[in-house]
Image: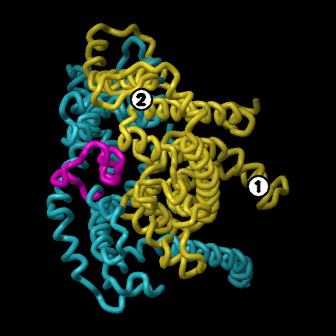
């Protein structure tokens, strides 16, 4: 999957429709498998099998040309204890996620709230703010970003500090701002969520004497929390996999001083530049486990702050 | 009297609204600056690019586009454009066919393990691409398909982008079941009723799938980077990449002219379908 923003389902909706009660007929079963066959083939050959192979390779030394050589846990040991660049890439990615995701979502929410009750021009603003989400993942825009934040670029002219992408302390912020710039995708989802909040709730709150702020805290926030949660999970997962802008601002090297060496860039470097496929597979599996763990933690904490109206007042 | 009171009552609201509009416009200016900058720089002569903050070029350097059209590494831009279109077009066809087939089974047909398989399909939406990337690369390498377009197009024909399967499933569930009941009574089997009844009604979801597949494939960099080596087979994105290593700013004009050309198909798609796109995206996200 690309790193673009995805329109996507709200949580809690990902269940299969209840199956009709009649007993399945044989011919229908057969038909179902015909319809499913491309997906089943893809799931086995391009997903399950590669995941298993990748796990196996992570315990080997493999350079694509010679057969894999079993080394046990050495890749993992080396990764965690002997490779400072690995930890550097972990730290860089975490910093990036922690800066980019909250900023992007906050901006998306603020703009969605501003557009919510607008009578004229809502469609125009919505489309205009959404446009960067379609263009932002491209190499073209990544190159623009490099130029804007480079020595002599617009940011240098405005702030006069010689641009950001040559400074280890600042370069990652330039990459993060490219993600923030694409706040339109979560904004559109927020806006749709806001519009589904029944007006009666606000009327009832107003009757009870709630002001604008109180209405926001007591009506908007809980009613919007499933959408907020959904955007948070989605954007976090995507942010962990950022690649193109980091590649573009550092010419694929992750510089200066490894300050834009995000996880996937280092994985690419180990696997496809240095031909350490075993090591890169180990990195991929750690990424998989970390993303799974972060998602699980988000789901766990969501019980205390995400409110599903359909559950009633449990 | 009445008109005066209503006008007075409305006034504060109107000021508030004006402030919101001004805020939005200001935000929009900042947001669109990088795109305006791109367009302006693609028309600037080399000596103007970093010399000043002036957005507007002193004089229009159309030769940047002429240079861009000559292409990169002796490969003409038409070739690059054609390669990009071939990959994106193949991906669109593959995703629309394979994802709608799988979606119909999940949305309407019954089979053993339906629940677990559906859950597995949903889980793969969140699966990071990198977990399967290296073995996929090894498989395609063994098949001798590295440096061809197969690794970029074939997976789309096997419904590997589960997100679209899910999107179409959600849409199909909204269609009344009576349609197929009627078709069945008229003697349609599952294949005819899929093709004749369900598929035409699913068109909005299929268009959303097509648009996003096109844009994501067009913008994709990582997969193309690892699978394509031959400059002849390069896409616009990969051709732009070769500018990344060249740090000389004299190439700025042509580089950004090519960047503009690379964005044009997306912009055209966006202008043609923008209403549909944003609607489709909002509803696919929230309607159960």
In front: A158, or B46? B46
Task: Tell me the element at label 1.
Answer: helix
| Residue B8 relative to residue B281: left or right | right
Question: Looking at the magenta stretch, what is its main secondary structure?
Answer: helix
- Residue A278's tag is 2
In the rendered view, tell whether residue B153 sits above or below residue B246: above
- Residue A110's tag is none
Q: Is residue A111 magenta?
A: no
Q: State which quarter of the image contains the N terminus of chain B.
A: bottom right
Residue B50 position in % (x across, y down): 43, 82
For residue A273, what is the image quadrant?
A: top left
Q: Which chain is yellow?
A: A
| Residue B152 relative to residue A142: left or right | left
The magenta-colored residue range is: B214-237
Residue A5 position in % (x across, y down): 46, 50
**Can residue A179 be seen here?**
yes
Measuring 14% from the left and 63% from the top, which residue is drawn there? B74
Measuring 47% from the left and 75% from the top, which residue is drawn there? B33
């Amino acid at each position: 999957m690309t790193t673009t923003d995805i329109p996507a389902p709200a949580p809690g909706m990902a269940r299969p429709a209840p199956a009709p009660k009649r007993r399945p007929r044989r011919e229908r079963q057969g038909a179902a498998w015909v319809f499913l066959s491309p997906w089943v083939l893809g799931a086995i050959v391009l997903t399950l099998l590669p995941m298993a192979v990748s796990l196996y390779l992570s315990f080997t030394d493999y350079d694509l040309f010679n057969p894999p050589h079993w080394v046990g846990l050495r890749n993992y040991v080396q990764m965690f204890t002997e490779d400072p660049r690995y930890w550097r890439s972990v730290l860089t990615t975490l910093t990036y996620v922690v800066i980019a995701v909250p900023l992007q979502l906050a901006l998306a929410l603020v703009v969605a709230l501003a557009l919510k009750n607008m009578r004229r021009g809502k469609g125009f603003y919505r489309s205009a703010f959404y446009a960067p989400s379609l263009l932002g993942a491209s190499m073209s825009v990544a190159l623009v970003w490099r130029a804007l934040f480079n020595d002599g670029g617009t940011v240098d002219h405005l702030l006069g500090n010689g641009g950001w992408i040559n400074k280890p302390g600042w370069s990652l912020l330039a990459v993060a701002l490219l993600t923030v710039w694409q706040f339109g995708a979560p904004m559109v989802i927020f806006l749709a969520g806001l519009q589904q909040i029944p007006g009666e709730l606000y009327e009832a709150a107003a009757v009870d004497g709630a002001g604008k702020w109180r209405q926001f805290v007591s009506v908007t926030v809980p009613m919007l929390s499933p959408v907020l949660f959904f955007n948070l999970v989605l954007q976090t997962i995507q942010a962990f996999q950022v690649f193109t802008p980091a590649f573009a601002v550092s010419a694929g090297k992750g510089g200066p001083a490894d300050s834009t060496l995000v996880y996937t860039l280092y994985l690419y470097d180990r696997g496809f530049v240095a031909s350490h496929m075993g090591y890169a597979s180990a990195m991929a599996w750690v990424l998989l486990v970390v993303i799974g763990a972060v998602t699980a933690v988000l789901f766990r904490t969501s019980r205390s702050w995400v409110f599903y109206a359909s559950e009633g007042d449990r | 009297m009445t008109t005066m009171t209503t006008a007075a009552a409305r006034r504060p609201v109107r000021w508030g609204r004006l402030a919101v509009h001004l805020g939005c416009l200001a935000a929009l200016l900042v947001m669109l600056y990088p795109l305006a900058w791109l367009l302006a720089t693609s028309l600037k002569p080399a000596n103007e690019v970093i010399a000043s903050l002036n957005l507007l070029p002193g004089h229009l350097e159309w030769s940047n586009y002429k240079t861009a059209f000559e292409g990169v590494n002796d490969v003409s831009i038409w070739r690059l454009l054609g390669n990009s279109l071939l990959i994106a077009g193949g991906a669109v066809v593959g995703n629309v066919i394979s994802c709608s087939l799988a979606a119909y089974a999940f949305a309407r047909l019954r089979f053993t393990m339906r629940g677990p398989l559906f859950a597995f399909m949903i889980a793969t939406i969140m699966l990071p691409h990198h977990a399967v990337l290296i073995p996929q690369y090894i498989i395609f390498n063994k098949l001798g398909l590295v440096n061809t377009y197969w690794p970029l197009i074939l997976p789309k024909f096997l419904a590997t982008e589960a997100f679209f399967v899910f999107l179409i499933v959600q849409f199909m569930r909204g269609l009344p079941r009576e349609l197929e009941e009627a078709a069945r009574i008229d003697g349609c089997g599952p294949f005819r009723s899929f093709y004749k009844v369900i598929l035409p009604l699913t068109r909005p979801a299929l268009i959303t799938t097509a648009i996003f597949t096109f844009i994501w494939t067009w913008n994709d960099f990582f997969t193309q980077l690892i699978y394509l080596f031959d400059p002849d087979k390069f896409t616009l994105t990969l051709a732009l990449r070769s500018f990344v290593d060249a740090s000389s700013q004299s190439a700025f004009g042509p580089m950004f002219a090519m960047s503009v050309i690379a964005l044009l198909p997306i912009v055209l798609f966006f202008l043609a379908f923008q209403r549909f796109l944003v609607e489709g995206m909002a509803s696919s996200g929230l309607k159960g």
